[in-house]
Image (spheres, coloured by chain):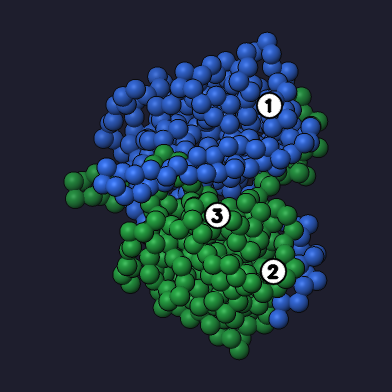
Chain colours: A green, B blue
Amino acid sequence: MKTTKKKVAPAKTAVKKSTKPIILITNDDGITAPGLRNLVEAMKTIGEVIVVAPDSPQSGMGHAITINKPLRLDKVNVFSGVVSYQCSGTPADCVKLAVNRVLHRKPDILVSGINHGSNSSINVIYSGTMSAAVEGAIEGIPSIGFSLCDFNIDADFTVAKHYAKIIVKRILKIGLQEGTLLNVNFPKLPMSKVKGVKVCRQAHAKYIESFDERLDPHKRKYYWLKGEFVNLDKGDDTDEWALKNGYVSLVPVQFDLTAHHAIQHLNSVKWH
Amino acid sequence: MKTTKKKVAPAKTAVKKSTKPIILITNDDGITAPGLRNLVEAMKTIGEVIVVAPDSPQSGMGHAITINKPLRLDKVNVFSGVVSYQCSGTPADCVKLAVNRVLHRKPDILVSGINHGSNSSINVIYSGTMSAAVEGAIEGIPSIGFSLCDFNIDADFTVAKHYAKIIVKRILKIGLQEGTLLNVNFPKLPMSKVKGVKVCRQAHAKYIESFDERLDPHKRKYYWLKGEFVNLDKGDDTDEWALKNGYVSLVPVQFDLTAHHAIQHLNSVKWH
């Protein structure tokens, strides 16, 4: 999809006053990704939508921010009736720019996605989709990352849209505890097979990694990361279990990374 | 500093058998950073050191990994008597490549840094230094990120080296709880003013961000991120408090991001 750039500066108040909730949308697959388009369609039925998304895919960017080079921010005409900007930075940059230079206020909710591919279990660490939601939560915005367990470019987002609407409406009503956000993953299933939403914890899983070793045309070696996902967690209260058993997984996430349970033990150590 | 590249493939067993612990070192400031050189000097007194570090600075890269392009890995001759590689990827990539293609085993400990600048409180989220340590912990390697609260290129690493040695020796002896790693920050103080090591939690802090808006030579707008750090946390058990009061801060960190305390509340919500 080609986007139309307008060389117009972000207006001081890009968003009209509205009684409807203001919903900021971003993602990490880039502004032309079908997952983003589907999320915009779903959220338009709930509130006033603003999109600030990367101008190119940013998968695997983790919580990267751009500090050593300038950022571009251009108004684009991608979604009918929706104020939209593309940004040259990462998902976290998009959130910072959206709040500071587009909205000039906090949105009522931030939704990121819908990611093409799972962000369950350990994927949350590497995910640009989730880093945008973490950035929102740091800013004090109720924030949710949505991901569909289907990498396909023409994946079916029917289930994802249906449940995203339910979850966003509920969170707009009840809010989220300070310092927390949601990581929501949708199974790759038709609507009739989905059993509902399950609140879970992040499964203990990892990638058994390896690197393809290849030679470039100049006979110089290069490496390409590949990895096999391994769920090490037998619990039936995890996101992996939920997705495998036909549920939408909903994990509350925090950005306080302190391993509080380890403090007492470490306090008993002599550090001199 | 100029590094000398040798077009030699990583040997199948780059590391000689040794009774000394194998210490993998990486960072996010790049292989020529003084902080890395100082960490190598300190660790050489403890064990057999292997360096796999980025070939260019990667600050602010968060937990980025490189999945959509190839990685380069070149043996370099930077540190006398230390097997060293530079890598074109992120700190997390360096750890994956080190374990898979250089060591072909897990090191006894992974140390990342010494970062030029603080990674206390919310900085842990954005830090490439810490992402390398998180990656190590995911791999089951006892891992520590070290940072000095001094951005200066010719910062004094005396205190950092002294305490890094103490902490690494201790962790080699007692290990770390599964799923945890350490985030260690050194205050910018002379040795005589440092009171010791304090086990802490991550302070609740954030950046009040703004963007410089500028015009490029073609009259097109660009934005540059700047931010003011604000500690919102009055606790005397935080890393910010410790650093401000003359201590080395030591925070146990976990990569399970689940906000376990929020699960019960979310379970009481109707999601249909």
Q: Secondary structure at mark 2?
A: helix
User: In the rendering, which numbered label is found on residue A20?
Assistant: none
**Amino acid type at mark 2:** Ile
Q: Which of the image's four quarters has the N terminus of chain B?
A: top left
User: In the rendering, which numbered label is found on residue B243?
Assistant: 1
> How far apart are the alpha carbons under marks 3 and 2?
22 Å
> How far apart are the alpha carbons under marks 1 and 2?
37 Å
Can the viewer see residue B267 in this picture? Answer: yes
Q: Is disc 2 surrounded by few (<14), some (14 to 19) or many (20+) residues within 10 Å? A: some
Viewer-side label of 1, 3: 3
Do residues under tags 1 and 3 come within 8 Å of each other at their CB atoms?
A: no
Q: Badge 1 sits on which subunit?
A: B
Q: Is disc 1 surrounded by few (<14), some (14 to 19) or many (20+) residues within 10 Å? A: many
- Vertical relation: A159 (above or below) B51: below
Looking at the picture, tell me which residue is in the foreground, B152 or B156: B152
| Residue bearing mark 3 | A104
Determine the residue positioned at 78% across, 44% down: A261
Q: Taking B76 as reference, is A42 left or right? A: right
| Res. A187 image quadrant | bottom right
Q: Earlier in the sequence, mark 3 or mark 2?
A: 3
**Amino acid type at mark 3:** His
Viewer-side label of 1, 2: 2
| Residue bearing mark 2 | A171
